Amino acid sequence: MSATWLPCGTYHESYAQDHAWWQTTFIKGKMILLFVLCFVVIPAMADGYWLSVCNQIGYTILGALGVQLLIGYCGQITLGHAAFIAVGSYTSTLLILEFPWPKFLMDMGLAYPISIVIAAVVAGIWSVLFGLPSAKVKGFYLILTTMAAQFITVDFILTQYVSQIGGRGQAFSLPPGTIKIGPWIIDSDLEVYFMMLILVILCVTAMANLMRTRVGRAWIAIRDNDISAEVMGINVVLYKLLAFFVAGFIGGIAGAFWISNLAAISTEHFTWFLSLWLVGVILIGGVGSLHGAIFGSIFMVMVMEILQLAIMPLADTFPKLLMDFLFIKEAAFGLAICAFMIFEPNGLAYRWWQIKNYFNLWPFSY
């Protein structure tokens, strides 16, 4: 039986129907409109500046997905996720620049895609190393452990040693035409935008499906009560480490993607503030929701861009405002978190859920 609206007049006769993503014609129509918006309207109407903003949103989504998995779904607080993004970024860059790829792989344009996969695996393994203390500690102590990952990885290993490979000093620059997937050369904001869309769709789809498996249910059980989860037979340590691996894996993809948007890569792109920023994104978007990672990323990036556009006309009169924009950005970030914790503690995803329910239940929405 098919219907246009949920929940009135719709029932499911199989497990597959109950868990289908697009259960009605109305939902399919919304997804088609979203596809047209992302792949047709935005590329046709947006200029280079707004495409770069969209790429920033996509990068934030990829980074926030790993944080959402650890904090929102598994209950493992992290404040060092930028370290794993940095590992993925540097691994992909060094593989492209330093690894002696066979000529046929270079000609086929497979070096960069392979480097993304390897970078994701390396970042995942590196994340597991700093997730090992989660077997013994949690809460405040785990926060300190993940912060150590940030300082050890970025400030020590990458800055003092990895950045010196090849005598380049502190930054790595990829020659034009280096980043390509098959015959597709990614050398403009528009090309980066399309690659971002593909990666975001793949990662969000993978995460959504993973959360509906036995593994996802185990993570949620650990988040709610790890002692009860262990009593039910869940190997708590194994699933915690698996969560760190998957989060690091997605972070590695984010880092490998981000090199396509940078003229040169350095450790300055992966400061501790990025780790804090990603936690703030899921707090504002909604903890424990994939929609939260997406909505939070869009909200935070757009707010900062609008704030910068508002300050630009005042730069001639008050030049110090432009010079101090970084501090203004941090202050706005803090105020946004405080405001959401007071007025909308469940985040934007919860508000979106309420809006959908209102229209689905109308005219009996009370």
Image (cartoon, rainbow, N blue to C red):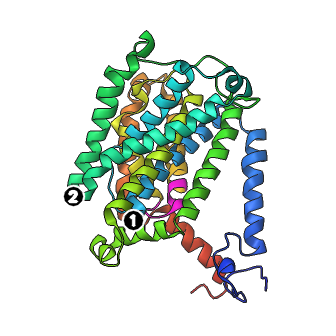
Q: Which residue does the image show at 78% across and 73% down from the upper left?
A: 25
Q: Quadrant of residue 157?
A: top left
Q: Which residue does the image show at 57% across and 33% down from the upper left?
A: 115
Q: CA distance from mark 2 to mark 1?
A: 30 Å
Camera-side residue of 98 and 193: 98
On the image, numbered disc 2 is attached to which residue?
136
SS category of the residue bearing label 2: loop
Looking at the image, residue 232 lies above or below residue 143: below
Q: Quadrant of the N terminus?
A: bottom right
Mark 1 or mark 2, which is nearer the start of the sequence?
2
Q: Quadrant of the C terminus?
A: bottom right
Q: Is residue 320 found left or right of 25 in the rendered image?
A: left
For the question of whether residue 306 can be seen, the reply is: no
Rendered location of residue 262, percent (x, y): 55, 26
Camera-side residue of 167 and 150: 167
Which mark is drawn over residue 345? 1
The stretch drawn in magenta includes residue 347: no
Rendered location of residue 97, percent (x, y): 55, 19
The stretch drawn in magenta includes residue 288: yes
Looking at the image, residue 274 lies above or below residue 335: above
Q: Is residue 308 found left or right of 195 in the rendered image?
A: left
Q: Quadrant of residue 191?
A: top right
Looking at the image, residue 210 lies above or below residue 175: below
Where are the magenta residues, as a range?
Answer: 286-294
SS category of the residue bearing label 1: loop
